[in-house]
Image (spheres, rainbow, N blue to C red):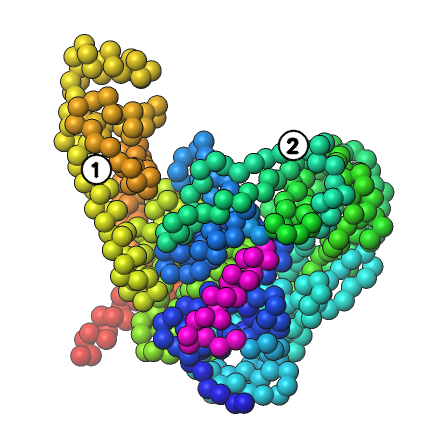
Amino acid sequence: MNREYDVIVVGGGHAGCEAALAAARMGCETLLFNISLDSIALMSCNPAIGGLAKSQLVKEVDALGGQMGRIADKTAVHFRLLNASKGPAVRSTRFQCDKQLYRLAMKTVLEKEERLHLLQGLVERLVVEDGRIRGVVDQTGVFHGGRAVVVTTGTFLGGLIHIGDVRYPAGRAGEIASLKLAASLKSLDFEMGRMKTGTPPRLRASSIDFTRLVRQDSDPDPEPFSFTTERLREDRLPSFFTATTPETHRIMRENIRFSPLYAGVIQGVGARYCPSLEDKVMRFTDRESHPVVLEQEGMETEEIYAKGLGNCLPPDLQERIVRSVPGLERAEIMRLAYAIEYDFVQPTQLRLTLETKHIAGLYLAGQINGTSGYEEAAAQGLWAGINAALAVQGGPPFVLDRSEAYMGVMVDDLVTRGIDEPYRMFTSRAEHRLILREDNAAIRLMGKGRELGLITADQHGILREKVRRIEAGIRKLSSVRIFPVEETNRTLMEMNTAPIKNPVTLFQLLKRGDLGYDDLSRFSGWEAVLDRMVKRQIEIEAKYEGYIRRQEEAIRKMKALEGMKIPAGFDYTAVPGLSNELKAKLTLVEPETVGQAERIPGMTQAALTAILIVIKKREMEAARKK
């Protein structure tokens, strides 16, 4: 059975699927391992794709030729645009999907990919020779050779589930943990840590009194995640809102000793931004209730995801907690809530390509890098899969910087700053978020996807035509002037906007917050635009032109530092004036550019100047020797 592959991907979650598809589509013979082929792309926690700052990642993955957005579009049953009343930089799409349809749809795509081979199996050991990955060994003892290996183990790496005083090894409920692979990574001298996450109970729909809950239907006219999607599903499922009660909190406080989280049993670090119900009750003592959202997990199942009720209490207490919530007085738990601890690798040991620094050809993506979330995992998987394929083929590395994509922000944060808690993407992490919007992801990145061979010529051609129409629309509005005559100002007042005192172009008029593109139809020279994407981009360019230009100027300054390379193997211990702490951090991270060095925690302008002086001095010495 021994075979040689270009790329081997370990783990078929959201990171593994994107990594495997990218490598195969770029021409590499690729092997994807998963413990169970029935759980490929399984939504192990909430049944949703997207959300605040996460939708930007999904749309970037799509623009580069990834699969997550396309599958979400195909299987979504509830649609929401978050922050719709706020500026475009923070608007985010969130789709609730049929989790079983999502899994099956992704599996179908994987199975049909020509160069992609699927194998159910448990990888137990990485084979490394002379500092380079050579392949993997599975639980049957069979060696599978690979020129590059991408490890995407999610919560399976040393996974340990906690429910009350019961704990047992598992990658998630019902699936075995990956224990020997964790030991293999530790034997290769990786610095590793322990993270913790959890999932709420799943409830039986027929046991819930929905008449006591607040119903939320989908947005009426949602836009898809994927540039390639022409039509979304018409089947819709509502979500429902309720909340915990003082009785819920009383039960929790009186029985908190039974929670392994508060008994000191769990050592892994959890996320501050996604606290368990135990944390919410015990930390926010002034709150009498916390929201609970009930999301249906699919069209053909009774399982309801009880967002907000995540805990790791014993089963009897879980039932009491659930039934203390309005509408859930008779609710039946189909799957218990639990907490899970798992191993991760400190991501400062990775290059910007997500290749490990001391083992060539080995890439890590997803929760093994300390991140959380389907979307963060998919973005890393795509990134790692692309770079694994390029390395095998002798191509240049694929790296996006912080000004180009949320993906670039995330990877730079991980490898430059490291983590001390599970990392998730927030709009606040992206200093150029007005430029890195979800609505312009295709414009920003599809050209790169085309260069990689992951976007077709037809798809790129459609985008180029849209861009041409956006530019033409801006030129048209900028060429049409209106004057402060009585008729014009009367029209403006009828539109509930202020009259003008000086001549302005329609483009300048569109800058007003109370006017949209179609409002300009009352003026001669306006032309109708039917394409929503084209119209939206024209409006955003008008309303945020000044802010966008300032961000572009900041990006130009940043690029100057990013363009200054630091020689490989640079000895920071020889730089005078650096603190021992900074020397240690710089030696660990091995920044590739001065810009990356600047973002290392604790870096000062004086220290950066000292590094620049030494680099320039050595360049001059090298030039004299020539």
Magenta-colored segment: predominant secondary structure? helix
Relative to 107, residue 208 above or below: above
Q: Which residue is mark 2?
A: 214
Percent of width and height locating residue 242: 69, 35
Give residue 473's mark.
Answer: 1
Check disc 2 and report its element: helix, strand or loop: strand
Q: Residue at x 25, y 70 (%)?
A: 619
Q: Is residue 608 visible?
A: no
Is residue 253 depicted above or below 612 in this figure? above
Residue plotted at (27% across, 68% down):
617
Picture coordinates of residue 183 (x, y %)? 64, 77
Few, some or many C-alpha atoms within 10 Å of disc 2 (few <14, some 14-19, many ≥20)? few
Q: Earlier along the polypeptide chain: callout 2 or callout 1?
A: 2
In the image, is residue 305 part of the stretch drawn in magenta?
A: no
Where is the N terminus found, in terms of image quarters? bottom right
Judged left or right of residue 383, residue 517 is left
Of the pair 296 and 573, the residue shown nearer to us: 296
Image point (51%, 61%), residue name: 105
577 or 619, which is in the foreground? Answer: 619
- For badge 1, the amino acid type reads Gly
Image marks 2 and 1: residues in contact by CB distance under 8 Å: no
From what the image shows, is residue 82 above or below residue 505?
below
Q: Which quarter of the picture shows residue 355? A: bottom left
Residue at the image point whose x is 49% and y is 71% from the top: 111
**Label 1: how many Cα within 10 Å (few below 14, some 14–19, many 20+):** many
Which mark, by number, is residue 98?
none
Nearer to me, 330 or 127: 330
- Amino acid type shown at disc 2: Val
Q: Secondary structure at mark 1?
A: helix
Q: Which residues are magenta?
A: 99-118
Q: Quadrant of the C terminus?
A: bottom left
The percent coordinates of residue 73 (x first, y second) are 47, 51
